[in-house]
Image (cartoon, helix red, strand yellow):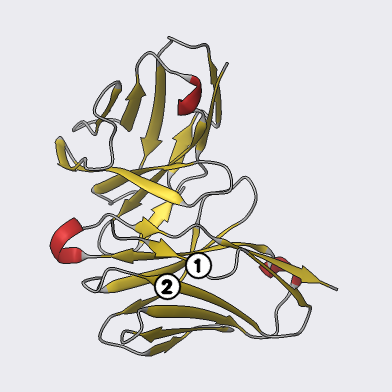
Amino acid sequence: GESVGLHLPTLSVQEGDNSIINCAYSNSASDYFIWYKQESGKGPQFIIDIRSNMDKRQGQRVTVLLNKTVKHLSLQIAATQPGDSAVYFCAEIDWANSGYALNFGKGTSLLVTP
Amino acid sequence: NAGVMQNPRHLVRRRGQEARLRCSPMKGHSHVYWYRQLPEEGLKFMVYLQKENIIDESGMPKERFSAEFPKEGPSILRIQQVVRGDSAAYFCASSWDTEAFFGQGTRLTVV
């Protein structure tokens, strides 16, 4: 069936470096994408979203890039901080077929070392 | 705004018992979603509800699981005759439009 998956299960970066977390999706009808951050023992926390009619969206220290041609999504975190250590999930919505149901990938664990 | 409130945070049940998980959405939110998360896994959609209506239950197991969102009170996810495989974290999210806010989850352990 359709799925959302991540290329790298774990990522270790040094404090101050930039981080890039990648996500592949297979549902070409997906039209809304969200990145979530989940810290241990907590619920997912919204980071940034992007609609399918956009290629790039920037937030505070984060940028999401969407390449619909290859069905790829990435999250860039600038000047990574220890507080960024968490599991990051990409999620997608196919409004027409699935409504509000978010389809989550497995997650990438980001570890920021001092 | 207290955010999405889930209780209990931790729930232990013996095999065959019933588990009731509660979710109070954020104030003003009329959409509620339930997700299940296994260790080292992403969240799997279970059900989407609006007040007194189940909109999409395509992710719900066909047996033993049910959900409701009554006119008054929290949304309830009910698991009857629990088995060990039901052990997981269950997250509730609510939204008014597109952005969904998640609760802290209920961690169900079946012994």
The secondary element bearing badge 1 is classed as: loop
The secondary element bearing badge 2 is classed as: strand
Q: Which residue is mark 2?
A: A24
Question: Which quadrant holds the C terminus of chain A?
Answer: bottom right
Task: Tell me the tag on residue A71.
Answer: none
A109 in relation to B16, above or below: below
Q: Looking at the picture, which amino acid does disc 2 mark?
A: Ala
Q: Residue at x 25, y 86 (%)?
A: A53
Q: Left or right of B111: which side holds A110?
A: right
Q: Residue at x 37, y 38 (%)?
A: B24
Residue B26 shows in the view: no
Q: Left or right of A49: which side holds A43?
A: right
Chain under disc 2:
A
Mark 1 residue crowding within 10 angstroms, few (<14) / some (14–19) / many (20+): many
Front in this rendered view, residue A74 or A79: A74
User: Does the CB distance between marks 2 and 1 fall below 8 Å?
Assistant: yes
Q: Residue at x 13, y 65 (%)?
A: A96
> Which of the 4 quarters of the picture holds residue B72?
top left
Whichever of labels 2 and 1 marks the residue nearer the N terminus, that label is: 1
Question: Which quadrant holds the N terminus of chain A?
Answer: bottom left
> Which of the 4 quarters of the picture holds residue B91?
top left
Percent of width and height locating residue A106: 50, 57
What separation in Å lies between label 2 and label 1 (alpha carbons)?
A: 6 Å
Q: Looking at the picture, which amino acid does disc 1 mark?
A: Leu
Residue B9 shows in the view: yes
Mark 2 residue crowding within 10 angstroms, few (<14) / some (14–19) / many (20+): some
> Which of the 4 quarters of the picture holds residue A110?
bottom right
Q: Which residue is mark 1?
A: A6
Percent of width and height locating residue B64: 30, 20
A56 in relation to A48, above or below: below
